[in-house]
Amino acid sequence: MKEASFYEKLADNKVRCNLCNHFCTIAENKRGICGVRENREGVLYSISYGRIVATGVDPIEKKPLFNFLPGTESFSVATAGCNMRCRWCQNWQISQLKTRDVPGHDATPAEVVGMAIQRGCKTMAYTYTEPTVFLEFALDMMKIAHRSGIKNIFVTNGYTSEEALRAVAPYLDAANIDLKAFKDETYRKLCGATLEPVLNTIRLYRELGIWAEVTTLVVPGVNDSKEELKEIAGFIADVGIWIPWHISQFYPQYRFLDAPPTPVDVLHRARKIGIDEGLRYVYEGNIPGKGNENTYCYQCKELLIKRFGFSIVENRIKDGKCPNCGAEIDGVF
C-alpha cells in the first residue's frame, strides 16, 4: 500500500482521484471504480501497490505489438483491478475484484525488474489488467527498467487521464490501446466507460511521440458493421496512417457468452476497410495460419515479416527499411 499520486483532497474527508477519466469522488473508507484506490481518513492510497497478481514472459507479438521490436520477448506484469467493466473481459478473474481483499504476492519494483533482466527480456509490459490503476507501482518499475536499458510497454484501455499519461511519458516507449467500439452507447452499456476520452488518449500518444498500436476486438452484433469499422479505421488514419490496427476475433467470455465467435470473413472485410481508409498496417488476430498477420511494405507490397500466430517465421526488414524498394517501415526494429 502506498499513498496515491494524482488526487486532490475535498471537503468532508472526500478525495477526487485524477488518475483516470472517471475522476472518481471517493468518500472516506470507500474505493474508486477500479477497486484498488481507497480513501483512508482523507488520504487516497493505492492498495494494490507491490501486490503482483500475474507475471509471464511473452512474445511481444502477444501484446499485440507487431511493429515494435518484433521477435523479442517481453516480461509481463500485473496487479489486480480495472477501471472498466467489459462484459467480454478475458482476464476478469484478476481485473474484476469480488472481495475487498487484494490478491497477489508482495514484490518490490527492483525485484520485478530483476526478473525481466534475469530472463533477458528487451521490454517490460504492464498488461493482463489495466496498468493505469497500478500506475504508481508501474512508474517505479518503469524508472528502474529505463535505467537498465529495458523498454516499457502499456497494454491499455486508453482511459488514463492526460495528467497521468504525461507523467509516465518520459519512461513509456510503446503501447497497444484498445478501441472497443465507435459508439459511446456501447462503451457505457458494455464497458462502464465513455468513448471520447479513449479517442483523446490515442491522439495524446501521438502528440507525446510514444509508439502506439490499436486493437479492436470485433464482436458480432456489437461493433462489426461496415459503417462502424469504417469509422474506427478512419479515426485511426486521421491520427496517423502508420498506426498498426489489430482486428481480433472474439470468443465468448465472462458475461458475454451468447454471441458467436467472429466469422473469419468479417475480419477479412475489416482489414480491407482499414486498407481502403489508408492504413499502412492492418493485422488480423486470433486466427493463426489464416493469413493477414504478416507485415507488408506499404509502398511495394513486398512481404517483410511472415508470422504464424505470435511466432515470426521470417523477418526481411533491414535497418528499418524494405529490402525491395527502400521504403522506411514505421515502427521500432
Image (cartoon, helix red, strand yellow):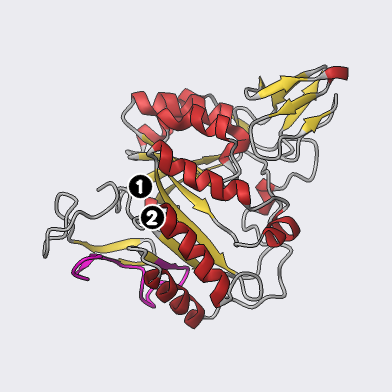
Tell me, yes or no, whether the two marked residues, 1 and 2, touch with CB atoms within 8 Å. Answer: no
Residue occupying the point 79% across, 46% down: 98
Q: Amino acid at mark 1?
A: Glu
Give the percent coordinates (x, y) of residue 192.
Answer: 73, 52
* Left or right: where 178 falls relative to 310: right
Give the percent coordinates (x, y) of residue 191.
Answer: 70, 55
Give the percent coordinates (x, y) of residue 68.
Answer: 33, 49
Residue occupying the point 42% across, 36% down: 208
Give the percent coordinates (x, y) of residue 220.
Answer: 62, 75
Q: Which residues are magenta?
A: 283-305
User: Against 261, is 20 above or below?
Assistant: above
User: Against 141, is 285 above or below?
Assistant: below
Residue occupying the point 11% across, 65% down: 324
* Residue behind mark 1: 73
Q: Is residue 127 visible?
A: no
Question: Which secondary structure, mark 1?
Answer: strand
Mark 1 or 2, nearer chain start: 1
Label 1: how many residues lie within 10 Å, few (<14), some (14-19) or many (20+)? many
* Residue behind mark 2: 243
Q: Quadrant of residue 314?
A: bottom left
* Left or right: where 204 falls relative to 195: left
Q: Is residue 143 visible?
A: yes
Main secondary-structure element of the magenta-colored stretch: loop
